[in-house]
Amino acid sequence: MALGKNYEGQNCSLARALELVGERWTLLIVRDAFYGVRRYGDFLAHLDIPRAVLADRLTTLVEAGILQRSRYQDSPPRDEYLLTDRGAELWSVIYPLWSWTERHFSTGEPLRTFRHAACGTALDPAGRCPTCGQMDVRPGDIEVHAGPGEPAQPRQDPVSVALRQRPHRLLQPLF
Amino acid sequence: MALGKNYEGQNCSLARALELVGERWTLLIVRDAFYGVRRYGDFLAHLDIPRAVLADRLTTLVEAGILQRSRYQDSPPRDEYLLTDRGAELWSVIYPLWSWTERHFSTGEPLRTFRHAACGTALDPAGRCPTCGQMDVRPGDIEVHAGPGEPAQPRQDPVSVALRQRPHRLLQPLF
DNA sequence: AGTGATGGTTCGTTGAACGAACTGACTGGG
DNA sequence: CCCAGTCAGTTCGTTCAACGAACCATCACT
């Protein structure tokens, strides 16, 4: 989405949502945050996004309370971007969107699966665990697994490589 | 989102999803389709969208199999745009996004509520009916109700007026 | 023949995204 | 101390999509 501004006049929560998370790149940044990406340079390498756009989106997300900056070293000063609780609740949007696309537009096997960490079962389309009967599996209890599908030309950036190498629990730092 | 093109290189279903429904206006058009809006002119009046952009998005949505055109009169030839099953499944994305925004960014009372038509109960954040214990309430079983909040300056276009006047079942034609 | 409704298309302007280059703070090595 | 390298941005000229006003085509009604 390219916008940022105003669906104003639309007195509608959905329109306000899209002002926040509907801009181009924003939801992919949030997805990466779920994967455990936390640093400017890692977002940059994984997303192939113009640097200025990334900087802009990160500050917007921080202002909206979806990400928070936190200092992880002082010299030189370096911050990382972490999902807040508010941001983590966006899992309920991201997973259904991912799932909808897998169901309707996938060709072949999925490149990733999302599994309930407690039992290893792949989540159903609504984000529940069919084995445990767990109603709302929280992102912290989910692992991303690679495959079974393989991309034609796998990306070589550190984030993509890490996600292929081993299952990774959402929200945990990737590095 | 403004894009339309390529998050290519992102071998990711979420990125492909955003190519389809992540463009500016697209999800608002789909939302209106759930409300029962079906005609070019009604989308136009309700959304305040440039005519060319609306025409472009409608054809894109039809090509993606999210909407389908169907002729409702022959002279002059007039088509309406209806959600397909694939499109209707986007409810699982739209409702959580609406709900997330209501929870985190609403000021005062909601302007609309979504209720289980069978029992009149407002849906919970996950889209379930707390009264019936119904797990996945399908959009065809949901009614949009106005209020309790009132917009400062209510819109006067036919779609907004109709949605304020009486509860309306999703997917049913508004006019 | 003239007017209005409907559903577009055309086109010049504006604004956002792109991407390459640059900056500034710091580290670690020689 | 100097130099190369890393990291996290900012700057800026170009490109491309959104905007919005005007125009157009088809048909009905009078």
Image (spheres, coloured by chain):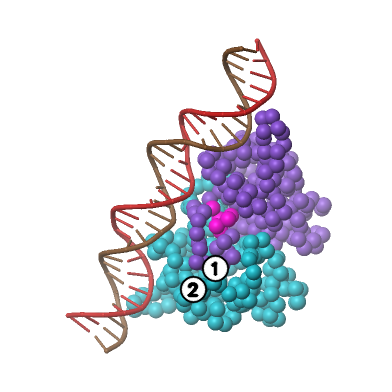
Chain colours: A purple, B cyan, C red, D brown
Are callouts 1 and 2 both on one chain?
A: no
Q: Is residue B9 visible?
A: no
Kind of residue indicated by mark 2: Arg
Q: Which residue is under mark 1?
A: A11
Q: Position of residue B167 (x, y in %)?
A: 59, 80
The majority secondary structure of the magenta stretch comes to helix
Residue occupying image coordinates x 58% and y 75%: B150
Name the secondary structure under disc 2: loop
Disc 1, disc 2: CB below 8 Å? yes
Q: Is residue D5 above or below residue A91?
A: above
Q: Residue at x 53, y 56 (%)?
A: B22
Label 1 secondary element: loop
Magenta range: A18-23
Q: Is residue B9 magenta?
A: no
Q: For the residue carrying disc 2, how many other residues have a C-alpha within 10 Å: few (<14), some (14-19), or many (20+)? A: some
Where is residue B95 drawn, in percent x and y? 63, 66
Q: Which mark is residue B155?
A: 2
Of residue B141 and residue C21, the one placed in the foreground of this image is: C21
> Front-most of A23 and A79?
A79
